[in-house]
Image (cartoon, rainbow, N blue to C red):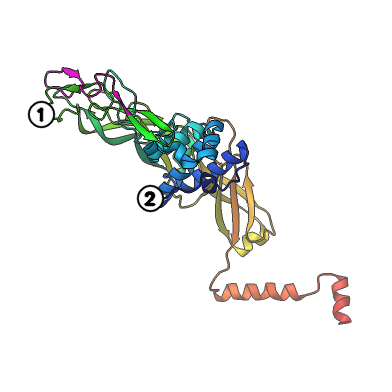
Amino acid sequence: MAKRDYYEVLGLSKDAGESDIKKAYRKLAVKYHPDKNPGDKSAEEKFREATEAYEIIKDPDKRSKYDQFGHAAFDSASGGFGGYGFGGFDLSDALRAFMQDFGGDSLFGDFFSFGASGGRGRRRSGGIRGNDLQIRLKLTLKEIDKGVTKKIKVRRKIKCDECNGTGSKSGKKIECSQCRGAGRVRRLTSSLFGQVVQEMICPACHGEGSVVRDPCGKCGGSGRKTGETTVSVDIPAGVTEGNYISVPGQGDVGLSGGPPGDLIVLITEEKDDFFERHGIDVFCTIEISFSEAALGTAKTIPSIDGKVSLKIPAGTQSEKIFRLRGKGLPVIHGHHRGDQLVKVHVNTPPKLNREQRELFEKIAELEKKPKNVFDRAKDMFS
C-alpha cells in the first residue's frame, strides 16, 4: 500500500512553520495514542503514521530530502537516509519518538515506549535489556486525594534459577560467528542513490556479540522464566487519569542475564457514586425540599475527606451551584487545592398526603393575594 504524503498526514501545507508542525502532530498523537484507544489497530496505525511524518517534517535536513526525493529518501528497502530506517518504522519506534519529544508534558517524564526495548538496544556485555511492561492501576478519588502506596502483583520474566540467568549450563558463552562479537552486522544495498551500507542488530546473537554454547535445559538458553513478583508503587496525591509512573527495573528481565526493563503504571480513575471530577474540582448534586429552599437550611454533606456543612439561604432556586473553597483535590506536588461544587436540586414530591395538599393550597391562595397597595389598585382597575 502506497504511503500518504507526510504533509497530508499532518494536515499541513508545505510552508508550515515549526510551531504549526508540532501543534498538528501533538493533536493527532493525543487523539490516536494507543493508551487512549486500547486494542484499536486503526488508531495505532494512524498514531504510527503521524509520528513517522512528524519525525521527517520537524527535522530541517530530513524535510529537505523529503521535499526533494519524497518517500524514497527514507525507504530502507532502497537504502535511504533515515536514521530510524523509516521503511520499518513500527509502533515501538513511534511510541519512543513521541515520549522523547513530549514525555516532559507528563507529570513524571521518565518514560520509554512500552515493549520497545527488547531486541532493539545496543550491544551490552551483560546481555540484552528486557522489555518494559505496562499495567493499569485503578484509584478511587479518596486515594487520589491523599496519595497511596499500592502493592501490585506483576507477571513478568524473571531470572532462571537453574542457570542464574546466563542461559548456559556451564555459564560460558562463545563469540558469535555471524557478527564476530560486534553485535551488529552490515548489509550493502543498492538504490537510485547508489550503494548504501546499512547497519543492523545481529540476528544470531540479538546484539549481544556472544552466544550460548550449552543452553540451559530449564529456560532453553534465554536465561529467564515466567514468574510473579509483588511491586510497591508510590502514588503521589493529585494524579489524574492517563498519568504514568515508571518503576525502574520491574519489567522483564533481559535475555542472557541482561538488565530488566521498567514497569510503566498507567493511572485510571474509578467512577465515584457521588462525585464527578473536573480537573482539581469535584462536583456533586444534592436534593432539598420546597420548604428548605424557601426558608433556608444547613445541610451536612459528604466531601472528599469527610463531612462538611453547607448553608443554603432562603429563596434558593433549583439547580443553583454553591462553591466550597479548598474542598476539591490537590495539585500534584503543590499546595493548592480545588473546590467542591454543589448543585442544589429542589425535589418536587410525586405524591401529597391530605395535610400536605391542604398546606400547599393555602400557600397557593396566599400567592394570589395582592402584596401591597399598588397590587390592590391594579386589581380594582383590571
Q: Which residue is drawn at 63% across and 41% down?
A: 15
Find residue 268 and name its label. Answer: none
Reading the image, the residue beneath label 2 is 41
Rendering quarter of residue 112: top left
Q: Which residue is drawn at 59% across and 72% down?
A: 356
Note whether residue 107 is visible. no
Mark 2–mark 1 contact, CB under 8 Å?
Answer: no
Q: Position of residue 182 (x, y in %)?
A: 28, 19
Q: How crowded is mark 2: few (under 14 residues within 10 Å), some or many (20 or more)?
A: few
The amino acid sitting under disc 1 is Gly
For this view, does 31 lie left or right of residue 34?
A: right
Reading the image, the residue beneath label 1 is 217
Q: Which of 236 and 347 is in front in this view?
A: 236
Q: In which quarter of the image is the C terminus?
A: bottom right
Disc 1, SS = loop
The magenta-colored residue range is 167-187
Q: Nearer the viewer, residue 254 or 245?
A: 254
